[in-house]
Image (cartoon, helix red, strand yellow):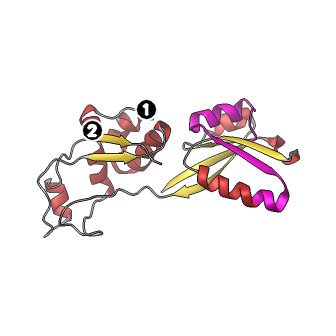
Amino acid sequence: MYWQSCCLSHRWRQQKKLNGAGATFPYPVYSAWAFDYSKVTGVQLNYQSIGSGGGVRQITDRTVDFGASDDPMKPEQLKKDKLLQFPAVIGGVVPVGNLEGIAPGQLKLDSGTLCRIFLGEIKTWNDDSVKKMNPGLKLPQGRLRLYIALTDQEQQRSLRTIWQRPALHGRIKSGPGKRSSSLPASAARAMRVLPTM
């Protein structure tokens, strides 16, 4: 699961127009909510999907009424900046495979194996650890290639590190889980980031 946090400043209550900025992930949901909210209350909502970092900067600078971020702000920062934070949108992150001869739902991968794939440690579909979870399944011998479709670099970093962290703890924290946008070279070579529509 992937959750989107939202931060509010105190001034939002008095206005007929609310301005927000931040992550691209929740933009379609916020747009739909804005339309319905405006019909009921007459309050217009303007949301700019500029990325999580921009949303955090704008809400802490008080240039918007709310900011949305893929990464929750730390309690100390919320207190210092007098902000409220709550989860606003939840979505799924789903790995999808396209392997000849394997029907949807047949391939099984646990979180540890997925982490090892993203770390570049598992390089082929017929790796022993993948075969062990999929007895009787004829896995291809070819190189495993990763393609990720995300709308911005902040989502890429946040999603990759949030869902991987529980499975491999220290190794992820000292590698891609450091909250940086870099991957190990072995994984980066295997990965292609695709633009989304």
Circle 2 sits on which residue? 187
Q: Secondary structure at mark 2?
A: helix
Q: Quadrant of residue 60?
A: top right
What residue appears at the point 61 percent right and 33 percent down from the top-left corner? Answer: 54
Picture layout, residue 105 above or below residue 97? below
Q: The disc labelled 1 sits on which kind of residue?
A: Ser
Picture layout, residue 22 above or below residue 92? above
- Residue 60 part of the magenta segment: yes
- Which contiguous range is marked in magenta? 37-65
64 or 31, which is in the foreground?
A: 31
195 or 136, which is in the foreground?
A: 195
- Residue 54 part of the magenta segment: yes
Q: Quadrant of residue 75?
A: top right
Residue 180, numbered circle: 1
Distance (Cα) linking label 1 and label 2: 14 Å
Indicate which label's residue lies in the foreground, 1 or 2.
Answer: 2
Residue 136 lies left or right of residue 82; in this view the side is left
